[in-house]
Amino acid sequence: MNVPIRMIGLATTFFWIFLIAFTATVAYSAKDLQFSFGELQVGGDSHNNLVLSLPIGVVNQGYYDIDAFNISTYITDLDGFRITRGSTFTPVIAKGGNITIYHNVTLSIDRLLRHGRNYLLNDTTMNVNESVSMRLANFIPVQASANFSIPWGAPLYNFELGDPTYSPYNLTHFSVVVPISFENHASFDVVGNVQASMYNDADMQTGTGQTTINAAQHSSFNGLLEFYVQMSNVTPTGRFEVNFQTSLFDYGPLVIPYG
Amino acid sequence: MANKNYLQRNLRSIVLKAAKATLKGVLFYMIYFLVWTIVLAPFASMLPWLQLSVETFMAIYITLMVIGELTSGTIYQYFFGVARSLFVIGYLLLTLQGGLIGMTFENVNLLVDLRLFLMMAMLFSLLGLAKSVLQAINYMSEKSEPPLILTPRDARN
């Protein structure tokens, strides 16, 4: 019986040494793992969605490969409404490897505006849940997650139509000029058309005008909307119904009273 | 004269056991010290409880090992062997929180899944436990049964 017992003892010692050495080197390798985050890039896709792309550099100078590297982003508004989610999966980051992963999150502004026009006209904040998971040496799964807030800049912040100015065009029509102004607080450019329809106090459409808008990110826009109305239909009060068609979103009508 | 020889033999045996126990204890502490300095020390700043936890484990483990060594040649050696294996199982289960360790650094939650490591450590500890039990059984059977093969000395007597 002595020989089998001795063999069990030897096997146990060997396994323990192997397990401790392996775990220690895995832990040591984790120390040599470096992450770097590049600048957030904002672009669009073919479906008129906003694509946020974050380049993440991973340098694995450890002794083992990293498997199942996954980054997930979950963005909600302050009420918990899911705005978007995205995940990027990299099967293997080889030892000694130095790679850059582009973590893309697609944001549909149209879908966002269907939830509420607040995002179009007012700045707000969004909650972000960021989660990174990986498996070290195909043995130890590790997950890190963080919650934080990011500001949301409204693309049409403080959108205003000024008082319409009437000047006679001919005997029957006025030429109407309406000043438009807004501030683009978003991190993308607003390029498109604004169409405004004028209604008098009898709910009758008196005229329609259209103009192009081109506001770079974090800039102000001032423009003029010109159209013609029949003199007899003009009333001192009424409303404008404004529609927006841009490369990233279509929205309307936004009702703004005048007079 | 015979009594004096018996005492001398006993004393030599105790001194040898003590020396062996001391050597083993020092060797284990050196291994721990090396592993701590090279591998675990960088994590100590992130995990303040780690050093105390590992030191407590090493202190109890080395104590059990030294006592086991001092009681070698008796049945108590195997009792301490069993105690050591059970201690490893219990301590790992408690300190590793069932294998899922959660930590929070400022706003970041870190979750390390050590269940596979824990399972393997449990398995090896159970192997050690089985070894100690088998050794105890073997010891008792050797004590109670006369040797089956007679040595020339047995034959002369």
Image (cartoon, coloured by chain):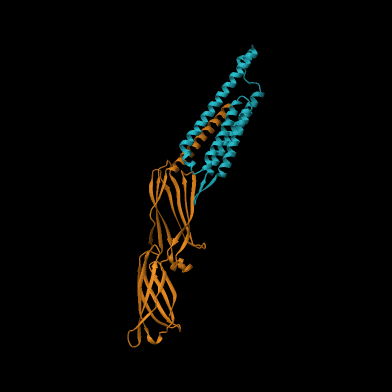
Chain colours: A orange, B cyan
Image location (x, y in percent) of residue B3: 65, 14
Can you see residue B157? Answer: no
Residue B29 location, x and y as percent? 52, 31
Can residue B119 be seen here? The reply is: yes
Residue B131 place in picture, x, y as percent: 59, 32
Q: How many marks?
A: 0
For this orientation, the residue located farthest to the top is B1
Q: Nearer the viewer, residue A178 or A147?
A: A178
Q: Which residue lies furthest to the left in this view?
A: A170
Kindly identify the residue that appears in the image at 58 percent across and 19 percent down.
B12
Taking A126 as reference, is A211 left or right? left
User: Which residue sits at x=44%, y=81%?
Assistant: A238
Residue plotted at (46% across, 36% down): B38
Q: Would you place residue A77 above or below residue B7 in this image?
A: below
Q: In which quarter of the image is the C terminus of chain B?
A: top right
Left or right of residue A18: residue A162: left
